[in-house]
Amino acid sequence: MLNEMRLHQKPFKYWWISLLAGILSIVGGILCFSTPIDSLAVLTLFFVAILIVGGIFNIASAFTNRKWNDYWGWDLARGIIELLLGVWLYMLPLVLVTTSIVYVFGFWMLFHSIIGICESCELARLPIKGWGWLLACNILSLICSFLFLTTPIFGGLFILVYIGVSFILYGIFRIVLAFKMHSFNRALQEE
């Protein structure tokens, strides 16, 4: 994933994009726990907004990190898929989006968990400690996404709790990843 020839050039130039995405996800998770069950429509709109903003962040991150990341196209694809999915959901009637949010969110978390597992394994190649925690967080999120997709019948409360926990796990992953990238940059500057 990393272009070894360019690692000495401060490879994680825009590490703060991951930090912003993580903070936004944690805020979304907290809102899930503070939102009443009968306001699932508000949560749905918030999820659509997170898809659009997250897609823009991932596209920006892909372009800004393309010099050091040989697989930056995957980040770009993730951003484009999120952006297109968010815009598509925004254009659909709210009732339809609210009823299908279970599956949309489940597959979104499955997708991000798999990518997060791959990113965590790539960090294992770098002299960065704590990559195992990132891997564990994504494996837990992957398990939760399977549970969510196989048991959507539990309805509103389960949806809110699952979405809240998933947003918080994803947010923690993105924040820790951002700080790991930042500390790697500092270590390169000290050499």
Image (cartoon, rainbow, N blue to C red):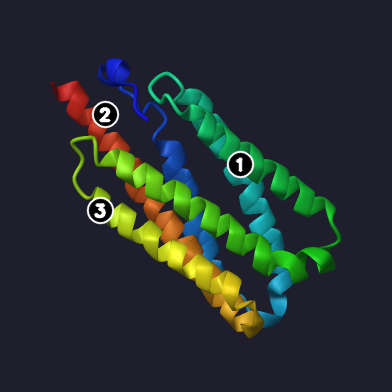
Residue 155, position in %: x, y?
A: 66, 82
What secondary structure is found at the residue carrying circle 1? helix
Q: Which residue lies furthest to the right in this view?
A: 93
Residue at 52 percent of width and 73 percent of height: 147
Looking at the rendered image, the quarter that the C terminus falls into is top left
Q: Which of marks 2 and 1 is nearer the N terminus?
A: 1
Does residue 110 lie above or below 126 as drawn? Answer: below
Q: Mark 3 points at which residue?
A: 132
Real-space CA distance between mark 1 and mark 3, rounded to the nearest whole angstrom: 26 Å
Identify the residue position indicated by label 1 in the image: 55
Q: What residue type is labelled 2?
A: Asn
Q: Which residue is drawn at 83% across and 51% down?
A: 91
* Contact? badges 2 and 3 (CB < 8 Å): no
Residue 85: x percent and y percent? 71, 48
Quarter of the image containing the N terminus? Answer: top left
Task: Tell me the tag on residue 185.
Answer: 2
Quadrant assignment, res 2: top left
Relative to 177, is 188 on the left or the right? Answer: left
Kindly state the secondary structure of the residue where label 2 is placed: helix
Q: Nearer the viewer, residue 26 or 99?
A: 99
Label 3 sits on a secondary structure element that is: helix
Q: Which of 139 and 166 is in front in this view?
A: 139
Discs 2/3, front: 3
Q: Is residue 71 left or right of residue 2?
A: right
